[in-house]
């Protein structure tokens, strides 16, 4: 039976190869190396991601940090920065991705603009996909110092995930986690119904 590589698992999870996925892959590898950590089976690691782009998928696969386990925290800051910490010893690293414009050329940039702008032909999309593989390979094979900086840091780790009881929204009838429910005029409401009730 053929062994599947970590990169192949990341690509399978994400669905395609792209520059951002390669960057997240390198970030996760760098963090795990410095932390001397294995992927989290449960909540042994905590990751704080400052973007919601492709690289986060690579980070989830390699570190085992996921929204469902409560050890992946999203901060919508639009920065290619990933902070990963260990619960057992408190050690943490902040991985800051560098500008990788060196990995692309004008043809690649033009193809991306055309295809992402909705003007690409099927041939343009095919060519972009082939070029994505080339660019990702450059990122994957580059020296770590060309791709990112890794800084040891300290973070305040959130408590382990808790399971809360659910309550039923009096307006829509859907179940909602108890601490997220709102009480309006004596009625238990989910956040969207509470906001509609307030006229937001």
Image (cartoon, grey):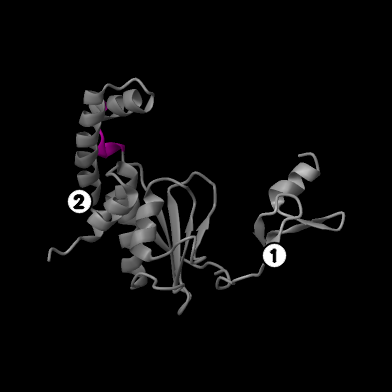
Query: Left or right of 175: which side holds 133?
Result: left
* Residue located at (76% from left, 57% from top): 182
Packing grade of label 2 (10 A; few <14, some 14-19, many >=20) is few
What is the CA distance from the residue labelled 2 to the residue labelled 1? 48 Å
Q: How many marks?
A: 2
Packing grade of label 1 (10 A; few <14, some 14-19, many >=20) is some
- Does the magenta portion include 102? yes
Question: Of 108 and 118, which appears nearest the observer?
Answer: 118
* Residue located at (27% from left, 21% from top): 121
Question: Of 41 and 35, which appears nearest the observer?
Answer: 41
Query: Left or right of 107: which side holds 117?
Result: right
Residue 178 circle label = 1
Where 157 sits versus 133, above or below? below
- Does the magenta portion include 30? no
Q: For residue 112, which quarter of the picture?
A: top left
Chain part drawn in magenta: 101-106
Residue occupied by mark 2: 141
Q: Earlier in the sequence, mark 2 or mark 1?
A: 2
* Residue located at (36% from left, 46% from top): 98
Question: Of 51 and 98, which appears nearest the observer?
Answer: 51
State the image coordinates of residue 99 (x, y, percent, origin top left).
35, 42
Q: For residue 188, which quarter of the picture?
A: bottom right
Q: For residue 58, which quarter of the picture?
A: bottom left
* Element class at badge 2: helix
Can you name the residue that lies furthest to the left here? 1
Where 30 sits versus 162, above or below? above
Where 33 sits versus 191, above or below? below
State the image coordinates of residue 187 (x, y, percent, origin top left).
82, 57
Question: If the image is split into quadrants, where does the N terminus sit?
Answer: bottom left
Residue 64 circle label = none
The main secondary structure of the magenta stretch is helix
* Residue located at (80% from left, 44% from top): 197
């Amino acid at each position: 039976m053929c062994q599947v590589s970590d990169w192949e698992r990341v690509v399978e999870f994400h669905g395609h190869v792209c520059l951002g996925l390669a960057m997240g892959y390198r970030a996760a590898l760098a963090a795990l190396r410095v932390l001397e950590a294995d992927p989290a089976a449960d909540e042994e690691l905590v990751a704080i991601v400052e973007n919601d782009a492709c690289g986060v998928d690579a980070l989830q696969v390699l570190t085992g940090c996921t929204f469902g386990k409560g050890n992946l925290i999203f901060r919508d800051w639009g920065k290619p920065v990933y902070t990963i910490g260990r619960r057992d010893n408190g050690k943490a690293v902040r991985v800051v991705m560098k500008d990788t414009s060196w990995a692309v050329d004008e043809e690649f940039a033009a193809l991306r603009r055309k295809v992402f702008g909705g003007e690409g032909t099927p041939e343009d999309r095919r060519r972009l996909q082939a070029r994505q593989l080339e660019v990702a390979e450059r990122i994957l094979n580059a020296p770590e110092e060309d791709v990112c900086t890794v800084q040891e840091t300290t973070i305040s780790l959130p408590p382990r995930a808790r399971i809360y009881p659910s309550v039923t929204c009096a307006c829509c009838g859907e179940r909602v986690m108890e601490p997220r429910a709102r009480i309006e005029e004596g009625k238990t409401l989910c956040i969207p119904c509470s906001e509609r009730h307030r006229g937001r």
